[in-house]
Image (spheres, rainbow, N blue to C red):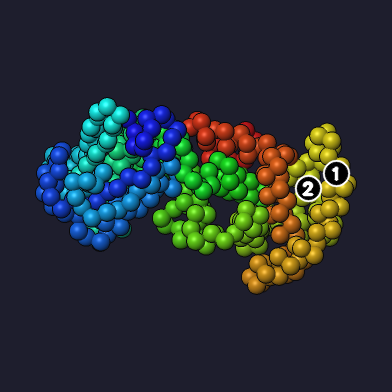
């Protein structure tokens, strides 16, 4: 049972309307209206969390019986235990299928919207219950938002996969496995010798606590190459990878740095075995100096980085982007294994050196 004109998994959920209930529903009495701005914002964010990754569009409308999903306060089991519930109904007929759903939050819980931790808890409960509304069952994975006892605040790989299996990938979305995960994993592996822990990926890719994550407006106008360059700049000039950059590439000429970076990211022997003209490839990168210098002047030097280092930092980001895009080289191979594990919902080796596993 899913939203949309088709009950075939992997098809769009279409447009689903929702509202804050002003009166009793079919499943819950809705003892009170969700009127506080903090709670309303959390509900809107919860709907956005699912629509960002799955092909289903949620539209807020004034409350009425025609609203597809209605949400409100209700009395459940008193303080503690159950904080929220969801109920789904369906109406069928010849060539006719219609869903309706309601989500209630226990009014007797000690909710404190002025507390960030409590507001986050309400948001997590909302994401969990909306997950049920779109067809997701409870998960046995404690890192899943659909785990019966809600503790995490972000979608797990299994949550994303489950929603996308039902509705497909959201139009225009950058799948974590194909872009953001590769970017974070490859650049952190290169500059720090390991990939981030799970909460590090969440913070960098899509976090309510990071106003400049990869899915926020700060990165909206960046193409993927510029994202790699930006991450390389942050890590290699002022972040955790600054010492690595300085000790490994800082004293090299640009031409020598290009050859070293090409060997480190792609692998000269591997490239040659694949029939790539390595000398020509390296010469092409060396001849791109003017382009790298222009980008460095615009994006790196304003941060106080010397021109020589800035050009090499831009070159590193650009080469890593090309390697990931072409899916060729030792870094692409190492990151592929991580991405496959993420997509399959397998146990993921967060926080490790990908070349040591």
List x then y, in percent, for residue 164.
45, 36
Kindly identify the residue that appears in the image at 35 percent across and 48 percent down.
58
How packed mark 1 is, by other alpha carbons closer than 10 Å (few <14, some 14-19, many 20 or more), is: some
The CA span between labels 2 and 1 is: 9 Å
Question: Label 1, on which residue?
Answer: 278
Vertically, is 91 above or below 102? above
Residue 232 appearing in the image:
no
Q: Is mark 1 on a helix, strand or loop?
A: helix
Q: Is mark 2 on a helix, strand or loop?
A: helix
List x then y, in percent, for residue 134.
33, 38
Of the numbered discs 2 and 1, the one sitting upstream in the chain is 2
Q: Which of marks 2 and 1 is in front?
A: 1
Kindly identify the residue that appears in the image at 15 percent across and 53 percent down.
22
Q: Toward which corner of the image does residue 276 lie, by quadrant? A: top right
List x then y, in percent, for residue 298.
67, 69
Question: Label 2, on which residue?
Answer: 262
Q: Assign the C terminus to one quadrant of the image.
A: top right
Residue farthest along the top direction in this orientation: 94
- Determine whether, in the image, residue 246 is placed left or right of residue 152: right
- Marks 2,1: beta carbons within 8 A: yes
How packed mark 2 is, by other alpha carbons closer than 10 Å (few <14, some 14-19, many 20 or more), is: many
List x then y, in percent, for residue 54.
43, 42
Q: Toward which corner of the image does residue 323 lie, by quadrant? A: top right
């Amino acid at each position: 049972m899913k939203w949309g004109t088709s009950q075939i998994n992997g098809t769009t959920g279409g447009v689903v309307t929702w509202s804050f209930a002003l009166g009793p529903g079919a499943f819950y009495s809705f003892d009170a209206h969700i009127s506080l701005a903090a709670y309303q914002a959390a509900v809107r964010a919860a709907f956005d969390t699912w629509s960002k990754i799955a092909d289903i569009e949620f539209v807020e409308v004034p409350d009425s019986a025609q609203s597809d999903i209605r949400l409100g306060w209700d009395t459940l089991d008193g303080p503690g235990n159950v904080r929220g519930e969801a109920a789904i109904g369906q109406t069928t007929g010849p060539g006719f299928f219609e869903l309706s759903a309601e989500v209630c939050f226990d009014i007797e819980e000690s909710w404190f919207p002025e507390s960030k931790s409590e507001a986050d808890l309400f948001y997590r409960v909302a994401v969990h219950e909306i997950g049920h509304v779109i067809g997701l069952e409870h998960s046995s994975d404690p890192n899943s938002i659909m785990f019966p006892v809600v503790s995490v605040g972000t979608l797990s790989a299994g949550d994303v996969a489950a929603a996308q299996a039902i509705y497909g990938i959201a139009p225009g979305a950058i799948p974590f496995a194909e872009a953001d995960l590769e970017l974070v994993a490859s650049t952190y592996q290169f500059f720090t010798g390991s990939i981030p822990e799970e909460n590090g990926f969440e913070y960098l890719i899509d976090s309510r606590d990071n106003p400049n994550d990869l899915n926020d407006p700060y990165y909206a106008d960046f193409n993927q190459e510029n994202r790699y360059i930006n991450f390389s700049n942050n890590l290699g000039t002022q972040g955790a990878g600054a010492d690595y950059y300085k000790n490994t590439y800082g004293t090299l000429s640009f031409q020598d740095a290009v050859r070293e970076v090409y060997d480190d990211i792609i692998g000269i022997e591997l490239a040659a075995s694949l029939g790539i003209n390595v000398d020509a490839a390296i010469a092409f990168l060396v001849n791109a100096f003017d382009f790298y210098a222009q980008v460095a002047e615009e994006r790196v030097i304003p941060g106080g980085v010397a021109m020589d280092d800035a050009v090499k930092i831009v070159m590193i980001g650009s080469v890593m982007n090309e390697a990931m895009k072409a899916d060729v080289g030792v870094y692409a191979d190492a990151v592929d294994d991580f991405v496959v594990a993420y997509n399959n919902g397998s146990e993921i080796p967060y926080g490790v050196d990908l070349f040591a596993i």
